[in-house]
Structure formats: structure tokens, C-alpha cells
């Protein structure tokens, strides 16, 4: 059974359609894209073969821990560094 959800989209001045800042439709709401815990949002699309996932707050989360926020801001990968003893 497929489920279709109408997204509240917006048209920019260049007549292109963009997704809303949050695709979160569940309760309780996930952290927003500008929240420090934004990576805790639920995954709504996952493409492991391409190395990225779309979270319901509009954040693209990459396999290397980098992120692309809905406003276009890039968050550099932030993997913990391995300590050599």
C-alpha cells in the first residue's frame, strides 16, 4: 500500500520549487535543521550506495558525517579522530 503526502512547497523568485524547511510529520517533532542535535531527526530517504540520507528536518547527511543544511550551509565532516597509543 502506497501513501502519498502533499508537501507544502514554495516557489522561489526564479520559479523553481523547493521543499519546506521541515518534512517532519510525526509526533514528537524532530530537532530542527538549525538545532545542535539535528542529526537525531528521522531518516525519510536513504541512499547508502550513494553515501547520503535525507532527514525529515531537511538535512542531507553524508556517510563521511558531513552535512548540507536546507539553507545551503555546509557542515564539514566531523568524525572523531582515532587516538594512537
Image (spheres, rainbow, N blue to C red):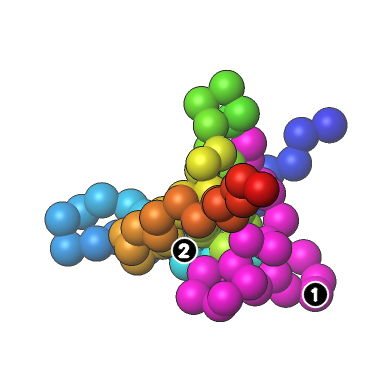
Judged from this view, the residue extending furthest toward the top is: 49
State the residue position of label 2: 20
Left or right: 18 in relation to 22: left
User: Are dots 2 and 1 in contact, CB under 8 Å?
Assistant: no
| Picture coordinates of residue 45, whole percent (x, y) | 62, 40
Instruction: Give the vertical position of 79 relative to 39 (above or below).
Output: above
| Picture coordinates of residue 27, whole percent (x, y) | 81, 71
Quadrant into which the N terminus falls: top right
State the residue position of label 1: 28
Of labels 2 and 1, earlier in sequence is 2
Task: Name the magenta segment's main secondary structure.
Answer: loop
Which range is magenta? 25-46
Q: CA distance from mark 2 to mark 1?
A: 18 Å
Q: Crowding near pointer 2: few (<14 within 10 Å), some, many (20+)?
A: some
Name the residue located 47 percent from the left edge and 67 percent from the top edge: 21
| Picture coordinates of residue 81, whole percent (x, y) | 56, 52
Membership of 27 in magenta stretch = yes
Element type at mark 2 = loop
Left or right: 58 in relation to 42: left
Amino acid at each position: 500500500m502506497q501513501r502519498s503526502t502533499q508537501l507544502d512547497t514554495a516557489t522561489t523568485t526564479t520559479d523553481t520549487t523547493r521543499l519546506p524547511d521541515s518534512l517532519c510529520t510525526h509526533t514528537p517533532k524532530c530537532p530542527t535543521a538549525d538545532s545542535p542535535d539535528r542529526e537525531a531527526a528521522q531518516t525519510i530517504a536513504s541512499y547508502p550506495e550513494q553515501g547520503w540520507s535525507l532527514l525529515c528536518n531537511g538535512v542531507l547527511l553524508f556517510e563521511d558525517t558531513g552535512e548540507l543544511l536546507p539553507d545551503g550551509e555546509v557542515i564539514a565532516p566531523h568524525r572523531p579522530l582515532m587516538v594512537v597509543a
